[in-house]
Image: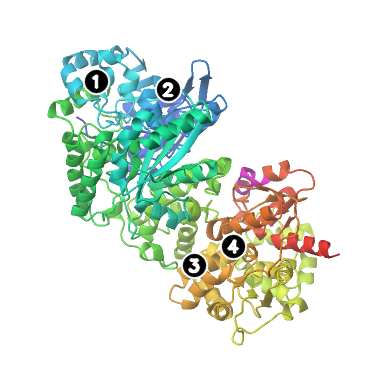
Amino acid sequence: MTRVTTTAPSTASTELAAALDRAIDGEVDASPRRRAEYSTDASNYRIVPAVVAYPRDADDLLAALETARAAGVATTMRGGGTSVAGNAIGPGVVLDLSRHMNRILDVDLEAKTARVQPGVILSELQKRVASAGLRFGPDPSTSTRATLGGMIGNNACGPHAVAFGRTADNVVSLEAVDGIGRRFTAGVRGVGAVPGLEELVTANLALIRQEFGRFSRQVSGYSLEHLLPELGGDLARFLVGSEGTLATILEATVRLVDVPPARLTAAFGYADMPAAADAVVGILPHRPQAVEGLDARLVARVAGATGPVPDLPEGAGWLFVEVGGETEDEARATLAALAADAGTSAWREVADPREAARLWAIRADGAGLSGRTPENDEAWPGWEDAAVPPERLGAYLRDFDALMERHGVVGQPFGHFGDGCIHVRLGIPLQESGEPLRAFMTDAAALVASHGGSLSGEHGDGRARSELLPAMYSGEAIDLFRQVKHLFDPENVLNPGVMVDPDPLDAHLRRPAAPRTPGEGFTFPHDHGDMAEAVHRCTGVGKCRADAIGSGSGFMCPSYQATGDEKDVTRGRARVLQDAINGTLIGGLTAPEVRESLDLCLSCKACSADCPSGVDMAAYKSEVLHRTYKGRLRPATHYSIGWLPRWLKVIGLVPSVVNAVLRPAWIQRIAVSIAGMDTRRTLPRFAKPFRATEFAKERRGDAARAVPKNSRVVLWADSFTDGIDPQIPTAVVEVLEDAGLDVVVVAGDACCGVTWISTGQLDGAKHHLEHLLGVLGPWAVNGVPIVGVEPSCMAVLRGDLVDLLPEDPRAAAVARGTYTLAEVLTGRSPVKPREGWRMPDLSDVTAVVQPHCHQYSVMGYAADRELLARAGATVTETSGCCGLAGNWGTEKGHYETSVKVAENSLLPALREAPEGSIYLADGVSCRTQADDLADVQGRHLAELIMERRRAASR
């Protein structure tokens, strides 16, 4: 069989791209940056494509396939790019169907079917049919970014497959084209659509009946059982799970299922995970909707990453079970009967839907969170989703634990216990070679086969497991796979290296190619000081591609929400950085392709909070800019906005003079243009610095003489509020004093250097932070809480400070001792408001609230949310970045995207707000953006509280 080479010469790539560009209406891109973005999925592997293309419709897709065939080049289909076995990468042409071929073509509520293009995201289909009480049954944890085409390719399942079946069980028909361009409709009694297939099946009936379809999660290999005459000769079901190696899907008709009107969730506790697995056999006869298992290792990991988890029954292994019914009484009766057969008395119903959602989120985020071991080492997919018959699950888990111990491998197993499917990422060192991975995988394949199981239970074999198929199938079955492949794709142009004639499982591994790369600015303490390890945190599960704005689930990734381009999503940027460090496609971290990839990164830091793998793209961008411009001339904005605190100090000497000079619009336009800013932006009005006011001077104190006491706090007025909005720190002081606290205002300038950090001027940032530690450090060391005003500046103290100055013990003290106003007022700091102090009544307040991205990501917004709720305010909380993001949104070339980001959430919320609503935003960027784009003036939380306090005292 033909072996297609991994890469193509640049001239061949250029010629192929030109041919594709002539043939299709969609975009075609052969640039190194684009190829780097698509060189890996959510797997361990890296294969550089020659070209990436985005067909607009079925005709475009057919034309792209024909062009590639004519050139003798392989094609690989890609949807959400979340394949963990390397199923969505390949040489030749990668065709991304998620960008344009993402339409729901038809929904037939009477027939309970939907006709979709392959790029439709599952959650979009679920939203479309939810009002009719329907859903597509399978629901993998990546449902907010996984496409139906990808699910069909892998035979995806998810938690509810135990009730509704696999993707194969929910596909009615497929419009497909095979490797030589034959187009056909695949469905029941469709074996004759492919010449020679019916004869091949007839000649191997005994073999197929003996080795295939033994249990529901036998997904590895081709699912030949669907072609048996007694099972309807269903060509569509057979193609599901063939991983794009036999045919390309143009559109699909899928079955929809009824959602039980009443659903209940319960958690059951057991001594360990194998004991929980043993209990599944007694549970399944009660026909649960979902049976998920996880153990203390993963729960502890979730708690460490996201905070406290819901109370779980006593145990070290748990089953999360969902039951359904036509009525709540029926569901409760089912749950009671199930509990009686669950083999444990440690269980509880989770009645609160919000708590139940948090419970299921532990499981949903497992793939990303388990990308690091409990010891904070790298962990990898590979043995990602093996499955055994449910009755063998407990025994298999005990043997698997012994296997991991024998190989010195750690992992955090979890999975779909109702189907006997286990997920685990392996703490195997891949920095040097793939030998440890090969040794473990070979033994693991033999183990799962000894339990009558499958190498893959839902993710497919891909490049990770295809080589191991002989461990579970006879030589005759493996030969049958080759014959089937030859009928559909004789030239081996569809996803070569997978399933048939596979690549070795330790070929094309990306991690061993990445040399250790110590930080030059940031120290990357969570990644052993290695930037290569930091950027490889990205597991590729693609949560950054989810509609975080629409679901209200988080803030990342704002630029991707605006553009829909893989270039502008956290994962795409991580892939380019990985390739830059590998040094094989992108010419190092200072290459122009890296700057292009990072250009629309707002440095919002949302990925550091929302990404389950802990990617911090803002830090990586800052490190890249530091390396790129160190000792070189920088862009104008690095000196203007990047040095803004320095200019504010000078302007503060004569603010009225500066305001007068800049008052004419034409002068301001010239000034912002020289500063490298977009001329549609305006400069703020400057003010006499807060620190220079008599109000501040009256409250100064000396930390060296200060004796910490339960009511003392020190106010830190950052450079922005000090020189632009001095009324805000004034309000903070008044509110704290009203709450009975003794407020000290620090004497002297204490800049956090946030604008130096965002522009990659890390030497300058460290200089400012060292000075800041001289001012604030003594207070923190003496136990006096520091109360900040501007969220982005507080986020530096709570986060970047320790990373940039890890050896200075004052840094840790300041990080621990810095609090927001809301944290102090809600009792989250060592000092508490006086007894009896209460928030003013805000029950008549309707507000649009914009949490600052850095506060959301580093400090969290829970305290502010609690404070406003306690006061009775009616709040609409935006669910994304405002789009200005400090210096980023002011820079030339960013204005249009900045506005699009604002349209994600902020601007619609302001437009739809009832008359008389206020805009509440603690961040100066957030207030500036609303003022610039909507002529809405925002207020800081302290200003609102102060105004109400003053009004109440009149």
Q: Is residue 392 above or below residue 425?
A: above
Judged from the image, the secondary structure of the residue bearing numbered disc 1 is helix
| Residue 750: percent from left, percent from top | 61, 75
- Rendered residue at 32%/26% (across/down): 70
**Magenta: predominant secondary structure element?**
helix
| Residues at marks 1 and 2, CA–CA distance in whole angstroms | 22 Å
User: Which residue lies under the disc numbered 4?
Assistant: 792
Judged from the image, the secondary structure of the residue bearing numbered disc 3 is loop
| Residues at marks 3 and 1, CA–CA distance in whole angstroms | 60 Å
Judged from the image, the secondary structure of the residue bearing numbered disc 2 is strand
Q: Is residue 850 visible?
A: yes
| Residues at marks 4 and 3, CA–CA distance in whole angstroms | 27 Å
Specify the segment rendered in magenta. 898-907
Task: State the image quarter where residue 49 is shown.
Answer: top left
Q: Is residue 900 magenta?
A: yes
User: Which residue lies under the disc numbered 3?
Assistant: 632
The mark closer to the camera, 3 or 2, is 2
| Residues at marks 4 and 2, CA–CA distance in whole angstroms | 47 Å
| Residues at marks 1 and 4, CA–CA distance in whole angstroms | 60 Å
Type of amino acid under label 4: Ser
| Residue 62: percent from left, percent from top | 40, 23
Type of amino acid under label 2: Ala
- The circle drawn on residue 487 is 1
Asked if the residues shown at circle 3 and circle 2 are in contact, with their CB atoms under 8 angstroms apart, the answer is no
| Residue 381: percent from left, percent from top | 31, 46
Q: Which image quadrant: the N terminus?
A: top left
